[in-house]
Image: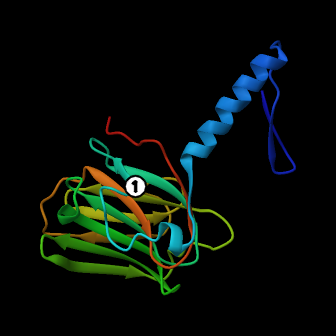
Amino acid sequence: MCILSNNTLERRIIGTSLKQEMELRKGFLILILVYLVHLTTNEILYLPQWSAYDGTFYNVENQESKVVFLKTCQGGVFGFFEWMNTSSLVYEITFGSYRIRTMIWGHDKNGPVSIATDPELIPEENRFKSFYFHWANNTMVVGAGPVVGQGPRLQLSSSIAATVRYMSVRTKKCPMDYILELSCRKV
């Protein structure tokens, strides 16, 4: 049984020994640490270019949506790639660009070819906000909220025929925290 109190999670497990409970707590803590990622200062983890070597690529093959909880002042960037290399960037989403808007860029092998912006889809610096990405049929949708397809959204349709297989995360100017949903698979 899990009980939330005073903004902390207390895990009370009936009928287990203290040792078993501690092992479960350790596993629970490790799970949280793995999926809550904090990109700290630009001196430590500033990622000015997309790189397959920085360890931020996530395989999203056979998926068409992803939910993220994001906390940043500006410049949280999510890239969607056909392959795990920098030349296959299909979509680039920048949250809080200049703290006034969120932008979707459509890319081909020569660089950006289309753009859509929205002043309402802005992350906050001091608390997590949920956003979703949905990509299908050469269209990228970015929306506010934890439910794909609901809430305010920004959409970019592109003439680029590419399959999104990888997602990557980087930061431009500010520290960024994000919690990435494990998967939203096609059924």
Residue 59 found in image quarter: top left
| Percent position of residue 51, x then y | 31, 62
Q: Quick one: quadrant of the C terminus? A: top left
Report the number of discs: 1
Q: Quick one: quadrant of the N terminus? A: top right
Whether residue 127 sits left or right of residue 111 in the image: it is right
User: In percent of the image, x 65 and y 30: which residue is there?
Assistant: 27
Whether residue 56 sits left or right of residue 99 in the image: it is left
Residue type at numbered disc 1: Thr
Q: Residues within 10 Å of mark 1 (few under 14, many from 20)?
A: some
Please tell me whether residue 74 is drawn above or below residue 40 in the rendered image. below
Extreme residue in the front direction: 43
Q: Which residue is mark 1?
A: 56
Extreme residue in the right direction: 6
Whether residue 95 sits left or right of residue 80 in the image: it is right
| Secondary structure state at the residue bearing disc 1 | loop
| Percent position of residue 78, x then y | 39, 64
User: In percent of the image, x 79 and y 18: which residue is there?
Assistant: 19
Instruction: Say which of 31 and 150 sits in front.
Output: 31
Instruction: Say which of 71 and 141 sits in front.
Output: 71
User: In percent of the image, x 45 and y 76: which residue is there?
Assistant: 172
| Percent position of residue 89, x then y | 23, 64
Please tell me whether residue 64 is drawn above or below residue 73 in the rendered image. above
Residue 184 found in image quarter: top left
